[in-house]
Amino acid sequence: MASTQASARPCASGLIHVNVRHTTRYTVVGNHLSQHRELSLLAKGLALYLQSLPAGASVGIKSIASRHPESELRIATAMRELEAHGYLERTRERLPDGRIVPRTISYNRPGAEPKPARTTAPPPPPARKAPPPPPPPPLPLTERHRAAAALLAELRVHDPRLLLSERDVHRLAPEVTAWLDRGSHPDAVRRMLCANLPASLAHPAGFLAHRLRTLLPPPLPTPPPPAPPAPTPRFIECDDCRRPFPPPTPDGLCTDCRTAARAVA
């Protein structure tokens, strides 16, 4: 709610102010205008009216007279008063298209230079951030993954779209090794990676990683273990005397029969 404030120590006679603070739709006027001794009250009122109008408003004599009870002659006389004391300036300007239009400038404080509009200083430029450090070099490949890395590096020979960086080759080599460990021939792995490539291949490393993981074949079945050798009998039968004797023997004869055969021979 607007506050009301009466002038301090009112006299028995004379003016008493009852002031209400304005918050919207008000115009600030200096006492140099309101108490000017050489301006008529009509000129002061006209100056106040002009200062209350927005920029671009129509302020011709006929336009002002149509909104007030004063005649055009009185309005023109008040304008000349304001011009004489520096509160008003009327000029004519030629537009680029050749037309001449009137220009009316109202000064709320004649003779004073207008202060430049306050502009917000542009924010300081952001501090330049240091570039991120380069990524560390890829770890050296173990001997187990060298064949897989060579297969991946040669894919660009079969299709230029499969050009891989050294880091991508090192990252995908274990995936290819898994295929080779499961009995896949290197030519079969190469054909699988190069077959039916999409027309637009923006990220070949990601595409190959997806194929290697989703199409990984199952391991080969484990062959059955070999049958154990037949146990050696504790005794065998002599081919001549039919007596049992412990092996081994090169001719199937016991010691006595072998000795007898040698004696006969």
Image (cartoon, helix red, strand yellow):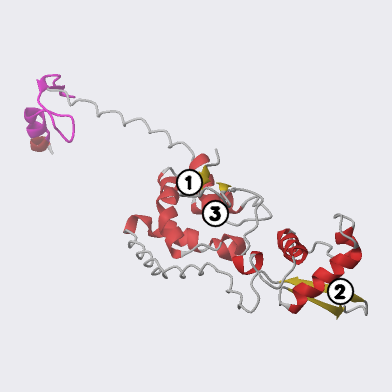
Q: Residue type at mark 3?
A: Arg
Q: Which residue in the structure is indicated by mark 1?
A: 184
Name the residue at the front extreme.
12
Residue 178 image point, x, y percent: 41, 46
- Region rendered in magenta: 235-261
Please tell me which residue is depicted at 20% across the width and 25% down the height of the picture: 231
Residue 71 image point, x, y percent: 90, 61
Numbered disc in front, either 3 or 2: 2
State the residue in front, 187 or 58.
Answer: 58
Q: CA distance from mark 3 to mark 1?
A: 10 Å
Which quarter of the rendering shows the N terminus?
top right
Q: CA distance from mark 3 to mark 2?
A: 85 Å
Kindly state the secondary structure of the residue where label 1 is placed.
Answer: loop
Q: CA distance from mark 2 to mark 1?
A: 93 Å
Label 3, residues with CA under 10 Å away: few <14, some 14-19, many ≥20:
some
- Residue 5 visible at all: yes
Pointer 3 with pointer 1, Cβ within 8 A: no
Residue 125 within the segment the image draws in magenta: no
Kindly state the secondary structure of the residue where label 2 is placed.
Answer: strand
Side of 147 relative to 158 (left or right) = left
Residue 135 image point, x, y percent: 38, 64
Residue 242 within the segment the image draws in magenta: yes
Please tell me which residue is depicted at 67% across the width and 71% down the height of the picture: 37
Name the residue at the right extreme.
98
Side of 139 relative to 52 (left or right) = left
Q: Which residue in the structure is indicated by mark 3?
A: 190
Kindly state the secondary structure of the residue where label 3 is placed.
Answer: helix
Q: Residue type at mark 1?
A: Ser
Q: Residue type at mark 2?
A: Pro
Label 2, residues with CA under 10 Å away: few <14, some 14-19, many ≥20:
few
Tell me if residue 127 comes above or below residue 255 in the rendering: below
